Amino acid sequence: MSTFTQYLRSRPLLPICLMIAVVIGAVYGWQKWQVYSVPDIGDPFDVEAYLTRTEDGERIEKITMETDERLNQLEQANQEEWSRYYANDGDYLPWKEVAPSIKADVRNAKPILEEWFEVSQYEPGLLGPPNAIYDDDWHPDRIKESQFLIAEMVKKSLLDAIERVDYDEQRDLYERFLEANSVYCHADTKNGLTAFMCHTTVIGGTLRFYLNQPDVPVDHLWGLKKNLEAHYHRQPPASNFLKYQYLTISSVIETELDMVEETDITKGLLEESETTRRLYAMLTANRLKYCDLPFSERPPLATFQYKIIVPPDSIENIKGGLKRELDINYFPDEQADEFLSRWELPSFLQQYRLAMMTSFEAFPSVLESCDFDQLRKELYLTRLALHLYYREHDQFPETLEELAPRYLSILPRNRDDAHSPVAYTIEDGNAILKPQENPLKTTNYPPGSDLSDLTK
């Protein structure tokens, strides 16, 4: 019997310890390979430049909140009438049927709006930090609600100016609103997309009535078209919001991990945080690579579906199983296949991170909102072009092609795979735009038409 064998027999636990050490070493080596085989691209964009591109956010926020407070005080002073207005769906009444006291308040709001318009002198940019979800002193919802209130008052002011046939005030309100609205488009994801909706509130809520004025100066129509084009040129691309989302989700994941018992030892051994950082950076780089391309040049979104184990929070939930399916949206290419394969069998901590990430993800909806907004902007410009054509020819064109290039540089197109032109017909002398998105369908009436049966 060899000396080595005798040695092992005298220490029966040693072989077991050696086997355990080998297994731990193998797992550790495999985990290290899992981490460091993922390319480290760093941050997918210049984070420092993105965060320091403006210092005016605090001042913009202050002006917005002050305007909100003053408008609320104005309504509270006439609370009974405003309550009746909202209770009777006042926003859906023709403006001429709105109570005189409401109209008086709208006119009294003019100096308040004048001060709010001053936000346009500040540099557009972030209104709050990406980790604002954990900041008790600032939250994007506060600015969001204020934006809606201000936009509604601007819309009412325009409808009032249209009723009073004050063309100069109409022109100034449009111009100054567009300049001020641009400031918010560059903010965080929530407020940036809210700015898009507020633009729709004002332009979409008044354009039909503005264009129906038979004697509105033609140079004012050209001026509004120019201001709209300048406004759209100032708007940031979808990547602006995806960058904010990247920083927000990175902050959320790190903060929420404090709730998970991940000790310093397991961090050192498993390096789960490093794996997640690298993978999410690659996913964001994939999205940033394609998201700003024109719709017709952008590859279609793909979905990677994975399953995670979710501990049940009740007996009833056990019946539905412990697995939950989650989706990650991306643009398909070779690099995407590489980093997505790393998420096919996520560990428990990776599962927790993935669940957190998808719960805060807004990528598909952000991209869809930007695409939808782009088509809506094209249709606004088309409606203006139709009325400019009408002013010179006393009729709408038979086809949209007749608008190019004098009245319209780019014809509106649907957001489908074929990038097909928006349908257009003439019915009873009215010009009808029929995009595939039915909510954007519009009927354009000749100037001076009776719109009394139409709501705002």
Image (spheres, rainbow, N blue to C red):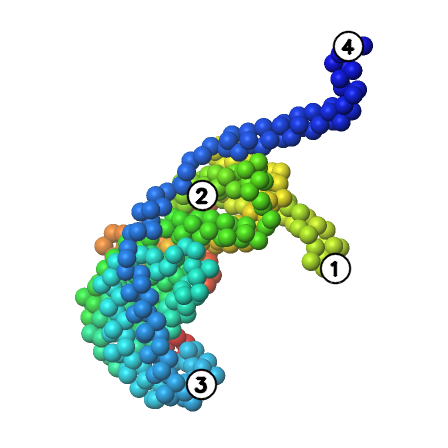
**Of callouts 1 and 4, the N-terminal one:** 4
Q: Work out whether residue 87 or residue 388 is closer to the camera in this orientation and state it.
A: 87
**Of callouts 3 and 1, the N-terminal one:** 3
Q: Are marks 1 and 2 in contact (CB under 8 Å)?
A: no
The label nearer to you, 1 versus 4, is 4
Give the structural element (helix, strand or loop) at label 2: helix
Assess disc 1: are there few (<14), some (14-19) or many (≥20) residues with their C-alpha within 10 Å of its C-alpha.
few
Assess disc 2: are there few (<14), some (14-19) or many (≥20) residues with their C-alpha within 10 Å of its C-alpha.
many
Give the structural element (helix, strand or loop) at label 1: helix
Q: Amino acid at mark 4?
A: Ser
Image check: 48 left or right of 327? left
List the residue tagged with mark 3.
83
Q: What residue is rendered at 25% in x and 58% in y?
A: 123
Q: Can you say whether 48 is above or below 140 in the image?
A: above
Can I make out residue 311 in this image? yes
Q: What residue is rendered at 35% in x and 65% in y?
A: 199
List the residue tagged with mark 1.
316
List the residue tagged with mark 2.
284
Q: Can you say whether 285 is above or below 253 in the image?
A: above
Distance between mark 4 and mark 3 Cα atoms: 98 Å
Distance between mark 1 and mark 2 Cα atoms: 37 Å
Q: Can you say whether 358 is above or below 316 in the image?
A: above
Q: Where, by quadrant of the figure, is residue 182 drawn?
A: bottom left
Q: Amino acid at mark 2?
A: Thr
List the residue tagged with mark 4.
2
Q: What residue is rendered at 58% in x and 44% in y?
A: 263
Give the structural element (helix, strand or loop) at label 3: helix
Q: Amino acid at mark 1?
A: Glu
Distance between mark 3 and mark 1 Cα atoms: 44 Å
- Residue placed farthest to the top in the image? 1
Distance between mark 3 and mark 2 Cα atoms: 46 Å
